[in-house]
Image (cartoon, rainbow, N blue to C red):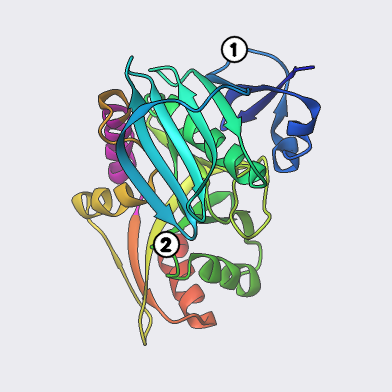
C-alpha cells in the first residue's frame, strides 16, 4: 500500500509516494521531514515498463552512469546504470513537477537519491535555487563554500577548518543548496552529502565562495564578477539545454557572481592554508 511523505529542503517542499520499504532507505531525509503543503514536485515509485526514448546525453561518474533522453511524446527520461547494468529509470513531466521512478536491482538507495536530486534541481531552477557540488562550512553566522573538481580537496579543506578554526561547523560535504531571495544569497544543508554523512537542516547567509586548486604553496586571490560566473557554472547541477532551466540558472548565477565574493585558493592540505583562507574571506573584507 502506497503512502505519501513530505520533505522540505531550502524552503521547497516535495512529496514521495511509495510503499513503506522505500522510506526505510530515506534515513538521510528525516531531518527534512515536513507537513503537507504546496509542493515543487512529487515522485511516485512505480513498476512501469522500461521506456523507449532517444538518448541526448550520458554522464559517467565512479561506476555510475546517467543517460538523459526523451520519449516520443517529449517527456524527459533518465536511465540509471551501475557498472553498466540498468538499475532504474525516471520519467518526468516537462516542467519536472512530477516524476515516476522504477527501481531494479540492489542499488535502490543510489537510484532514489539520484532521482530526487535530479527532480529537485530541475524543478527549482527557475525559483532562484541552485544545487551545488561543493563542501560548505559555517563560521560566525555565515556559510563558506569550497568548489573544485572531484579529488581537488574540498572535503579535506573543510576538515581543516573544523580542526583549526574554532567555531566553524560542517553544513554539508557534497551537495548544498543555494537560494537567491530578495537580492541576498543563502546556503542550506541537504540530504545529499557524499561520503561524509552530514544531513543537517540548517541555513545561513552565504559569505563567500572559494575555488580550490592543489599547489606546492598557499596563495589566495579575489576573482572578478566574470571570473566568478565562470567558476560557478561547472559546480551547479542543471540541464543546460533546457531553456527554462538554463534561463533560471543564468539569472541566479549572475546574482551570485555579483553579490557574493569569490576567491581562488591554490593550496597545500595544511593548517596554514585554512588559516590563510579564513583570514582573507572572513576577516579581510
**Gap between marks 1 and 2 measured at Cα:** 38 Å
Residue 189 versus residue 54 in the image, above or below: below
Quadrant in which the C terminus appears? bottom left
Image coordinates of residue 155 in percent, x first then y, are: 54, 66
Residue placed most toward the observer, 167 or 24: 24
The residue lying at 67 percent from left, 27 percent from top is 7
Q: Quadrant of residue 158?
A: bottom right
Residue 249 colored in magenta in the image: yes
Q: Quadrant of residue 223?
A: bottom left
The residue lying at 62 percent from left, 24 percent from top is 47
Image coordinates of residue 167 in percent, x first then y, are: 66, 62
Which residue is identified by label 1? 38
Labels 1 and 2: the sequence-earlier one: 1
Which residue is identified by label 2? 281
The residue lying at 38 percent from left, 45 percent from top is 236
Visible residue check, residue 181? no
Residue 51 versus residue 283 in the image, above or below: above
The residue lying at 57 percent from left, 73 percent from top is 160
Image coordinates of residue 151 in percent, x first then y, are: 45, 69
Residue placed most toward the observer, 14 or 265: 14
User: Magenta segment, which residues?
Assistant: 246-261
Amino acid at each position: 500500500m502506497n503512502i505519501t511523505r513530505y520533505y522540505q529542503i531550502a524552503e521547497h517542499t516535495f512529496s514521495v509516494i511509495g510503499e513503506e520499504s522505500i522510506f526505510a532507505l530515506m534515513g538521510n531525509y528525516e531531518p527534512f521531514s515536513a507537513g503537507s503543503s504546496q509542493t515543487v514536485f512529487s515522485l511516485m515509485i512505480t513498476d512501469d515498463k522500461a521506456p523507449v526514448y532517444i538518448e541526448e546525453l550520458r554522464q559517467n561518474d565512479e561506476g555510475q552512469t546517467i543517460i538523459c533522453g526523451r520519449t516520443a511524446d517529449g517527456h524527459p527520461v533518465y536511465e540509471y546504470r551501475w557498472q553498466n547494468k540498468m538499475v532504474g529509470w525516471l520519467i518526468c513531466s516537462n516542467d519536472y513537477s512530477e516524476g515516476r521512478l522504477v527501481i531494479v536491482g540492489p542499488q535502490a538507495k543510489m537510484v532514489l537519491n539520484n532521482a530526487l536530486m535530479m527532480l529537485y534541481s530541475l524543478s527549482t531552477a527557475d525559483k532562484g535555487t541552485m544545487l551545488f557540488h561543493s563542501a560548505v562550512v559555517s563560521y560566525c553566522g555565515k556559510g563558506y563554500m569550497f568548489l573544485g573538481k572531484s579529488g581537488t580537496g574540498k572535503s579535506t579543506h573543510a576538515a581543516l577548518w573544523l580542526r583549526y578554526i574554532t567555531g566553524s561547523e560542517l553544513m554539508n560535504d557534497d551537495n548544498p543548496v543555494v537560494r537567491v531571495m530578495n537580492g541576498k544569497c543563502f546556503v542550506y544543508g541537504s540530504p545529499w552529502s557524499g561520503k561524509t554523512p552530514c544531513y543537517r537542516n540548517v541555513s545561513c547567509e552565504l559569505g563567500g565562495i572559494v575555488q580550490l586548486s592543489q599547489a606546492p604553496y598557499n596563495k589566495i586571490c579575489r576573482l572578478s564578477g566574470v571570473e566568478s560566473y565562470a567558476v560557478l557554472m561547472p559546480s551547479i547541477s542543471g540541464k543546460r539545454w533546457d531553456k527554462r532551466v538554463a534561463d533560471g540558472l543564468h539569472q541566479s548565477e549572475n546574482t551570485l557572481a555579483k553579490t557574493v565574493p569569490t576567491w581562488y585558493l591554490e593550496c597545500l592540505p595544511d593548517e596554514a592554508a585554512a588559516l590563510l583562507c579564513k583570514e582573507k574571506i572572513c576577516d579581510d573584507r
